[in-house]
Amino acid sequence: MKLNHEYLVELQSEIPNSFRTKMACDSLDINIEEKSKHKLLIEGIKVPNDWSIGLILGASGSGKTTLAKEIFGDDCFDDTINESKPIIDQLPKDLKYNDCANLLSGIGLTSVPCWVRPVYTLSNGQKARAKAVLQMTKNKDISVIDEWTSVVDRQVAKVMSHCVQKFARRNKKKIVLCSCHYDILEWLNPDWVIDCNDQKFYNRDLKKKEKNNLSLLSKKSVKTHGGILASIII
């Protein structure tokens, strides 16, 4: 894992030269080329050696995924799942049945038929939970789960967050979650947070006089900025 004290990520979207895009750009009294660029600079990143849960927060287009890949590498984003097999048959062979059942229930898949049906028959929310369990249990030094709780309701999001942090700490795993939702903070209880909206780093292990108050983040509303980015420059 690459770990520096400062990360700079630049995202830029190309604007097609079509009639409609030109009309849309001309309707705005702004420099559309400049508005299609986004620079993310995070300073003072000091991830402790002993941690279990990390959280990268930010609105869509704020650079969460790109930043996570820059820090932890592309290999951490392995969310491949066999949609023709039941999720319970895809969990690691060394997990006992009771452990599998507890994990699936804990992540919000409380219906046994969801465990034993092919993954392609599940809803989008159920698939997201199935993929999360699979990523959590993979034998990796660090796993990164993108779009955490993006396609589930907020009550399920809290249940999922509580489950993943308990699993990570109990099994001495390192799991990083990328999300646009601040309301999961109290349930995740992360060891560190990168807020891409405010471009700040928060570390729970800092001394009290130096420590940023993580609880304040949970009260924030998600800020909307950025957009759909067709090309990414690092």
Image (cartoon, grey):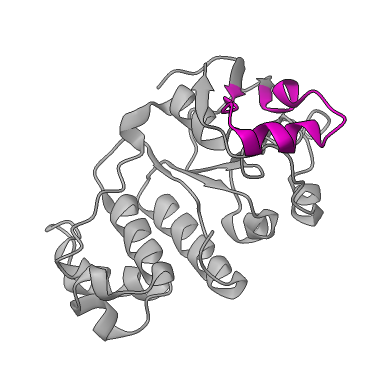
| Nearer-the-camera pick, 42 or 100 | 42
Please state the extent of the stretch shown in magenta in the rendering.
11-40
| Nearer-the-camera pick, 119 or 51 | 119
Q: Is residue 153 rendered to the left or right of residue 87? A: right
Residue 205 placement (x, y as % from top left): 65, 35
Residue 203 lies in quadrant? top right
Residue 55 lies in quadrant? top right
Q: Answer whether residue 169 is magenta in the image.
A: no
Examine the rendered structure and indicate whether residue 159 appears above or below residue 214: below
Q: Is residue 146 rendered to the left or right of residue 201? A: left
Examine the rendered structure and indicate whether residue 77 appears above or below residue 183: above
Residue 132 placement (x, y as % from top left): 37, 57
Q: Can residue 223 be seen in this view?
A: yes
Q: Residue extending furthest right?
A: 29
Q: Answer whether residue 25 is magenta in the image.
A: yes
| Nearer-the-camera pick, 119 or 18 | 18
Residue at 33%, 58% (x, y): give it. Answer: 131
